Amino acid sequence: MSTAESIEQIDYPESDGLPMGETDTHRRWMIRILDRLSYRYRDQRVYVASDVLVYYEPGQLTKFIVPDDMVVLDCEPGDRRVFKTWEEQRVPDVVFEVTSRGTSTDDMVHKPIVYERMGVSEYFLYDPTGQYLVPSLQGYRLKSGVLHEIAPVDGAIACQTLGFSLRLDGLNLEMFDLASGERLLTEAEANLKRAEAEQRRAEAEQHRAEAEQHRADKEYRRAEQERAARLVAEDRLRELEAELRRLRGS
């Protein structure tokens, strides 16, 4: 049996035994970031995942890392049990970690070393509570094999690889497309936005129709008034003609 065949027969665990997120807040933000990224890259050849074990050395069951959220460009989408970099021939391009009390040291010290070794292009940390990370939003970009901190510009950190910026609104994380300035939405948010826009269009159409009806009613009343005035004038003319005939015949 070849080494490659023996590696493929290894049963790679699908869980590290740790919960997805330390608190409800952290789990909620992991899912929210996942939903935004998934909707942004819908129908594209991009793999977006959350809390999936990423194995980065063949045959080494301890050589894995679990990003809270990650994006892999030029990679077939779809569900995976684990992500093996040697099979995919890809590594995560961008990783997001939602930092908590129990993960802050790992997120700030240990994981960057692995991500550097793997060649992750950009790495972002976000603390939704503002208690374990100062500042609460941080970004790092790989240069010459080392992750360097990204300097904020006007309070925003650019994710060049994916073409959007990240900024805090209070403690809430917002993402904005660098080209359009539009806020990144989840599918549910996008559907709600479309529904609200459709409702506004329907209301505007209703207002337009009501205004048109009002103009039509006003025009009809004006025409009726002119018709009534014309009839009165015609009646008066007939009366005058009759009076004139009477005077001529007398």
Image (tube, grey):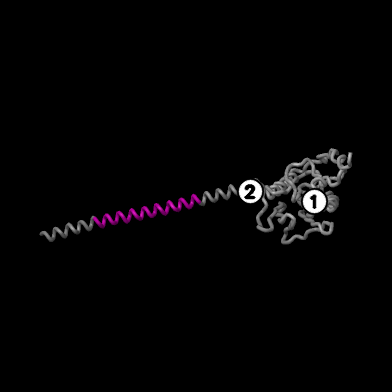
Q: Position of residue 181 (x, y in %)?
A: 66, 57
- Most common SS among magenta residues: helix
Q: Which residue in the structure is indicated by mark 2?
A: 190
Q: Quadrant of the N terminus?
A: top right
- Crowd tier of the residue under label 2, counting other residues whose Cα lies within 10 Å: few below 14, some 14–19, many 20 or above: some
Please give the name of the residue rendered at 39% of the width and 52% of the height, measured from the top-left corner: 217
177 relative to 59 in the view: left or right: left
Asked whether residue 223 is drawn in magenta, I would say yes
**Which class describes the residues within 10 Å of circle 1: few (<14), some (14-19), or many (20+)?**
some
Q: Is any atom of residue 102 visible in this view?
A: no
Q: Position of residue 84 (x, y in %)?
A: 81, 45
Amino acid type of disc 1? Tyr
- How many numbered circles are shown? 2
Q: Position of residue 63 (x, y in %)?
A: 86, 45
Q: Secondary structure at mark 2?
A: helix
**Direction from residue 217 to residue 184 in the image, left or right:** right
Residue found 82% across the figure and 56% down from its top: 147
If you read the primary sequence from the N terminus, does the residue marked by circle 1 or circle 2 appear first? 1
Q: Which residue is mark 1?
A: 132
Check residue 124 for magenta coloring. no
Q: From which residue to which does the magenta span run?
A: 205-234
**Amino acid type, callout 2:** Ala
Residue 205 visible at all:
yes
* Picture residue at 34% right of the left edge, 55% below the top: 223
